[in-house]
Image: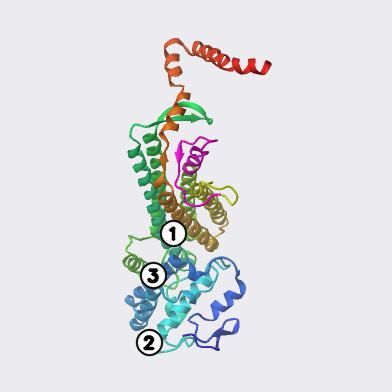
Amino acid sequence: MKVSGVRVEGDALGAVEVPLSALYGAHTVRALENGLSSGPRLGECVDFLRAFAHVKAAAARANADLGVLDREVAQAIVVAADEIVGGLWLDEFPLPLVQGGGGTATNLAVSEVLANRAAQILGSEPGRYDLVHPFDHVNRSQSTNDVYPTALQLAVIDLSERASGALADVAGTLDALAEAAGDLQRLGRTCLNDALPVPVAGYHAAQAAAVRRTAKAIDKAAGALTAVPLGATAVGTGVGAPEGYRERAVAKLSERTGRELRSAGDLFDALAHLDPLLVVANAVGTAAIALAKIASDLRLLSSGPVGGIGEVTLPAVQVGSSIMPGKVNPVVPELVIQASFEIRGSASIVESAVAAGELDLNVMGPVIGRQLFQALTTLEEVAQAFATRCLAGLRWNQATVADHLKGSLQTDVERAVLVGHDLVDAEIARRVRSDLAPAEEADHQ
């Protein structure tokens, strides 16, 4: 239960009033005064917050092993971090995700909550900082410069894995449609005009291949993020950390996350250039384009059912009109298309933020994080909806498909190979004039 009242804490700028029972402290209150009231809060970005807690716990373990942090204090910090990983104390992180200062406010907020919770574990109370201090203990051997991008990369890896898994579900559903199609053929179209027959199985198999290709690109891009800058401290110098800290902290972080992490090869590069995150953003945008293309095709093929192509029937998942009874719309494909706009917009913002880095540190990590988290989550959700609410119930209307195959140009193509293109062109022209003649005569009458 929250206790009413306030406590007074101090920072370099003076005294600050903090809610008495809050686990956050003066630095969080200061940052709240300078942040936006809109947009996601840090406590809502569970994957990022969990990653940050893992980083802090790994650092505490490494510091204790190297003798620069009391083991009892380190253990209390680890226990507090594990609680955050488990989903506790999320309401203690009210800061907006996007903020100035390169993420310093986020690092301080996490450090404050961990310090105050660790103090409680050791029998003290929030706001005293005599047993556990946000800077001296929780942030020992660290800088925002290295812990923020490390946590950001870990969160992106987790979210990428889930998005890639959802794309795999889409590809699997398309594989099932290909297998169910048998030897069914549909009229292929180029420039939206009649062309040659296309096997429905091949059509869906090609879609599955495209989706798998984009998922593989996301996996590859996210894989590059396993090289983390933890231990770089301020601007890549490693200053303030004991010898051997970087290797030990990364090893502890690997143990906690269950991932094969490694130290970034060039720490100065890792802090100054965030283009690996742009590669992820572009891969996610490409996946969204692939899904949108498939969704757009199915929306077109399902148009009608009388006045359109009508070769495909999509599952009816909701009422389609407030005035026309019986109308059903392709709402899931339209959702996929609109989501692709947002995802590609996020990729564009990430590009601008990566390009805005200057000198020794790119301080635009918060907006990169927000856009990547949003894009990956949206991709995961929309892919799941596409697979389960649309593709799984798709049905080909075989009678309509057979009727449209009458427009196939295959016979003409094969005849052109035998007698020449010009002769077949002339035959088609005569046939078209013959087909139009009755209508022209009717017009004259």
Against 180, residue 77 (above or below) is below
Q: Does the magenta stretch include residue 297?
A: yes
User: In percent of the image, x 37 and y 67: which residue is there?
Assistant: 246
Label 3: element kind: helix
Local crowd size for mark 3, using a 10 Å CA cut-off: few (<14), some (14–19), many (≥20): many
> Which of pointers 1 and 3 lies earlier in the amino acid sequence?
3
Label 2: element kind: loop
> Which of pointers 2 and 1 lies earlier in the amino acid sequence?
2
Residues marked 2 and 1 touching at CB (< 8 Å): no
Q: Give the range drawn in magenta.
A: 294-320
Label 1: element kind: helix
Q: Is residue 172 magenta?
A: no
Q: What residue type is labelled 3?
A: His
Residue 86: x %, y % from top left: 38, 72
Q: What residue type is labelled 2?
A: Leu
364 or 183: nearer the eye? 183
Against 4, residue 42 (above or below) is above
> Which of pointers 3 and 2 lies earlier in the amino acid sequence?
3
User: In percent of the image, x 48 and y 48: which residue is there?
Assistant: 288
170 or 301: nearer the eye? 301
Tell me the tag on residue 328: none
Per the model, the C-alpha gap separating discs 1 and 3 is 14 Å
Which residue matches tag 2? 122
Residue 342: x %, y % from top left: 54, 53
In the picture provided, is 292 more to the left or to the right than 120? Answer: right
Against 112, residue 190 (above or below) is above
Which residue matches tag 3? 54
Tell me the tag on residue 156: 1
Residue 349: x %, y % from top left: 56, 54
